[in-house]
Structures are given as structure tokens and as C-alpha cells.
Image (cartoon, rainbow, N blue to C red):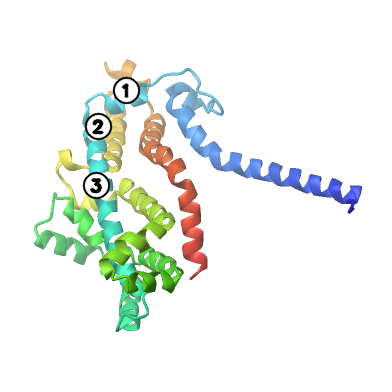
Amino acid sequence: MYIQNPIHMLWSRAGTAANYVMLGVFSLAALYPLWYVIVSSFSSSRAITAGEVSLWPVEFNAQAYLRLFDDGQLFVAMGNTIVVTLVGTLLNMVLTTLAAYPLSRKRLQGRNFLLMFIIFTMLFTTGIIPNFILVKSLGLMNSYWALWLPALLSTYNMFVMKTFMEGLPDEIEESAAIDGAGDWRILLQIILPLCKPIMAALSLFYAVGWWNSYFNVLLYITQSNLQTLTLKLYQMILQVNQSLLNNGTGSEGVDQIMLTPEGIKAAAIVIAVTPILILYPFLQKHFVKGVLIGSVKG
């Protein structure tokens, strides 16, 4: 019977404890900035300005949230963002899948030429001005298609999915073909169910990108009722800054003194990231597995 050396056991336990301590320190270092933003959003302007906020809200108030939600525009912007995110992510996943599957099959004629052609688009981009002129000439201004069409496919994500599909055994496809299945049936009923991890990971990538989209919305969407959450929050922060400058010493100064740009910014950040924080735990398992498999097998 093997008896482990007590000294080795002691060192092993000490190493394990040190790992837990280091992971705990790194976790706290990563989480504290987000926690600080949350407690700042519920603290008074005086406490934020005086630098008294650290771990808990000081002089608790929710004026920043009330200011952002009081006119209802934020709910409209959030609804627009949900539409942009859901439709954009769906279009991205459809195009990514339809591009990755044939390129992952070695029997595709001209496969290497197509891959080089696609890689070329990763090295050279058209730029902002040509894109803006193209979108405007197509009559897509103030339409969500101005956001979706130029970003239908991420080349990087397509290569990640292609790499994942290349790792699937060829015998699966060959068996299905012998049984009479066509390409569409093989893709929809055999390949895609095996690609759930990478699809979950890429869906999260795309969804986060659409949820945080700002610059293209600023360029192509000028109607207020079509603007998304990030742009609306940015405009509200600017309005609060201007309002404080104009009315900080006037009759509305008593109400405005409860607000600071830092408090409004903190509340805006919390509103913007909360849906993603709620969604992430449900996809975390597939996210880690999909990214690791898709990258390592490349």
C-alpha cells in the first residue's frame, strides 16, 4: 500500500490553498470595478464627489435611475436594442453557418481559392466614408438594415465555426449520405446538433456586439424613436451635463444637486450591462467549451 510522504502532502495542500488565494484576489480585482460602479449609481452626489464611496452606497438614493427612466424614452430604446440584437444575431448565425459548413468540407471545389478570398477581406477594409456613401445611396438611412447588412458575417467567427466543423468525424456525414440524406438534411439534423457549444459561444459574441453597438447607430440612425440603448444613454448623459451647467445655481438647482455626471454614467453602465450579465451564466458552459474547441483544433 502506497503511503504518501507527509511533507509532500503538506506542500500539496499549501499549493492548493495558495491557488485559491490567488484566484480569490484576481476575482476580487476583476469584480470590484463593476461593484464600484453599482454602489456609485446608488450613492449621493456629495458622497461621489467627496470620494467617500468604496464598498457600499453612501447616502442611498436612486435619483440617477429615476432621471434616466422618467420620460419613457429609455424603454423605447431598450426595445429597439432587443430587436436589433435578436434579428442581428439570428442573421449572423444563419450566414456564419451557411458559410462555414461548405468551407469545412474538403470536397468543395475551389475551397482554397474561396478561403484566400475571404482572408483578403480580413486584411483590407473599405473604411467609414465608402460604407456611409453606400448605405445612403441604397436608401437604408434610418433603417435597421443599415446596421444588419454591413455586418451580416464576421470572418473571424466564420473561421472559428469552420474549424469546429472540420473537427467532426467525416464518417458521420458519410453514413448519413449513404442513408440518402442530402446536404441540407445533413447540415440541419446532424451537423448543427453537434455544433451547439460553438453556436452558443458565437451567438453570445454576436449578441454582445449588437447590444453594445453605438458608432453605426450614430451614423445611420437619426430618428429619435429608432435609436438604441447605448446611443440614448450617451445622449441622456450629455443632457444631464448641460442641464447641470445651465440650472445648477438656478431654481432647479435643489433637484439637480442630487445628480452628478458620474452618478448618471454609473447608472447608465448598470442599465446597459445588466441584461448581458443575466444572460451570460446560462451560456457560460457552452461559451467556454465552444471557444476552446474552436480555437485549439485550428
**Disc nearer the start of the sequence (3/1):** 1
Residue occupied by mark 1: 66
Residue 184 position, x and y percent, is 26, 66
**Disc nearer the start of the sequence (2/3):** 2
Query: In terms of secondary structure, where does tag 2 sit?
Result: helix
Q: Amino acid at mark 2?
A: Phe
Residue 41 position, x and y percent, is 43, 28
Q: Residue at x 24, y 49 (%)?
A: 87
Quarter where residue 195 is shown: bottom left
Q: Is residue 167 left or right of residue 158?
A: right
Q: Please identify, in this view, whether the residue under mark 2 or under mark 3 is nearer the observer.
A: 3
Q: Is residue 81 left or right of residue 53?
A: left
From the viewer's perspective, is residue 187 above or below residue 104? above
From the viewer's perspective, is residue 69 above or below residue 196? above
Q: Residue at x 28, y 70 (%)?
A: 183
- In front of the other: 23 or 67: 23
Q: Give the numbered dot on residue 84.
A: 3
From the viewer's perspective, is residue 224 above or below residue 157? above
Contact (Cβ within 8 Å) of mark 2 with mark 3: no
